[in-house]
Image: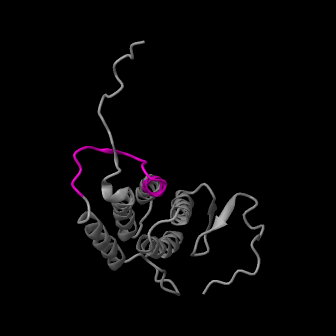
Amino acid sequence: MVYLNRIYTKSGDAGETSLGDGRRVPKTHPRIGAYGGVDELNSVLGVAIAAGLPDAMQAMLMHIQNDLFDLGADLCVPESDTPPEYPPLRVTEPQVTQLERWIDAATDQLEPLTSFILPGGSPAAAHLHLARTVCRRVEIGVLDLVARERVNPQAVIYLNRLSDLLFVLARLANDGGKADVLWTPGKHREVASD
């Protein structure tokens, strides 16, 4: 249970913050960047939801927003060989499996791509593409942390699947892919004539 009776604590004024295990680290620590990125991604999903998506897609993204809080909590508590007093919240394989089910269901509604697509189309699709790119960047930040410290492998897998899901949802938001904007390789390489 979380209880917040005061928003500012002044404990971070010197540039440090506490991890979930109580250890103090600089706010520039890769772990802080990793779960801060997850928070940013969650906010971008909130903007996508507010853009007016279909009810089923909104419900799916709200489910994911809750999962992203789980992911942030997971990243906030470093893996340890010493058993903690309270088991930390960790992202699980069933959470990843749910994303895969949604990806498969969405993909079944789309025609296969014959080209890469440009991020855009409808406003809702553009918001979902933005969320997808933020998700990829967050995944890279978590992988940077993985190169330095132990991290729950499901956390990385979850972000990888989520970016795939956001891609197919963006296509669905573009009239089931019919309004996707296709990339034309080299389209503007020639000098325009007057």
Please state the extent of the stretch shown in magenta in the rendering: 111-132
Residue 147: percent from left, percent from top = 40, 56
Residue 105: percent from left, percent from top = 27, 70
Give the camera-side residue of 19 and 138.
138
Q: Is residue 120 left or right of residue 187?
A: right
Give the camera-side residue of 49 and 71.
49
Give the camera-side residue of 171 and 102.
171
- Assign the N terminus to one quadrant of the image: bottom right
The relative height of residue 96 versus residue 113 in the rendered view (above or below) is below
Residue 191: percent from left, percent from top = 37, 16
Give the camera-side residue of 117 and 29.
117
Count of numbered labels shown in the rendering? 0
Question: What residue is shown at x 56% (from left), y 63% (from top)?
Answer: 43
Residue 150: percent from left, percent from top = 41, 66
Question: What residue is shown at x 24% (from left), y 50% (from top)?
Answer: 113
Q: Is residue 80 magenta?
A: no
- Assign the C terminus to one quadrant of the image: top left
Question: What residue is shown at x 44% (from left), y 59% (from top)?
Answer: 142
Q: Is residue 171 left or right of residue 55?
A: left
